Image (cartoon, rainbow, N blue to C red):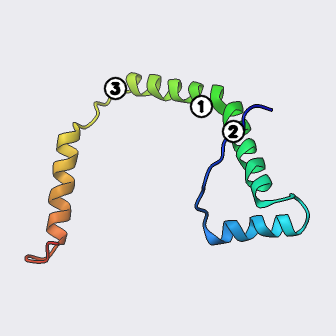
Amino acid sequence: MGKIERIVADLPEDVFADIEQAVSAGEFGSVSEAVAHMAKAWVADRRADAPGFVARTRKAIEDSRADPHPGYPVDEVLAELDARYAAMIPDGDHR
């Protein structure tokens, strides 16, 4: 095993409770061990899916380029959204 790096992570209360429960049940020796196990599993899944992700992304780009319908200019989309949301706010109620 290579060098170990230490991190600090903020977890939702329910997630932390599940981790503590797994440690209490003897599934892991410590909270640190449980979090390390989860991080390793996430990295393994991510690495395993990397070729699929690249292939899906390339396909999406090819499909987009082959689409005969033109896209919408971002400036027009943003202007339309600004107008719609401005119309929803009563006069004088801008924060």
Is disc 3 in contact with disc 2, using a CB cutoff of under 8 Å?
A: no
Q: Position of residue 5 (x, y in %)?
A: 66, 41
Is disc 3 in contact with disc 1, using a CB cutoff of under 8 Å?
A: no
Residue farthest right in this picture: 26
The quarter of the displayed image where residue 16 is located = bottom right
Q: Mark 3 vs mark 1: which is more N-terminal?
A: 1
Residue 62 vertical placement versus 15 (above, below): above
Residue 6 vertical placement versus 82 (above, below): above
Instruction: Decide if residue 42 is on the left or right side of residue 90.
Output: right
Residue 36 is tagged as none
Q: Mark 3 vs mark 2: which is more N-terminal?
A: 2
Which residue occupies 60% across, 55% down?
Answer: 8
Considering depth in this image, is 88 or 9 the residue closer to the camera?
Answer: 9
Q: Residue under circle 3?
A: 68
Cα–Cα gap, marks 3 and 1: 25 Å
Considering depth in this image, is 75 or 21 the residue closer to the camera?
Answer: 21
Q: Residue under circle 2?
A: 43
Q: Position of residue 40 (x, y in %)?
A: 74, 42
Residue 53 is tagged as 1
Q: What element carries label 3?
A: loop
Q: Is mark 1 on a helix, strand or loop?
A: helix
Q: Mark 2 vs mark 1: which is more N-terminal?
A: 2
The quarter of the displayed image where residue 19 is located = bottom right
Within-10-Å neighbours for mark 3: few <14, some 14–19, many 20+:
few
Amino acid carrying mark 1 in the image: Phe
Which residue occupies 41% across, 28% down?
Answer: 64
Which residue occupies 46% across, 22% down?
Answer: 62
Instruction: Decide if residue 38 is on the left or right side of residue 10.
Output: right
Which residue occupies 48% across, 29% down?
Answer: 60
Residue 1 vertical placement versus 78 (above, below): above
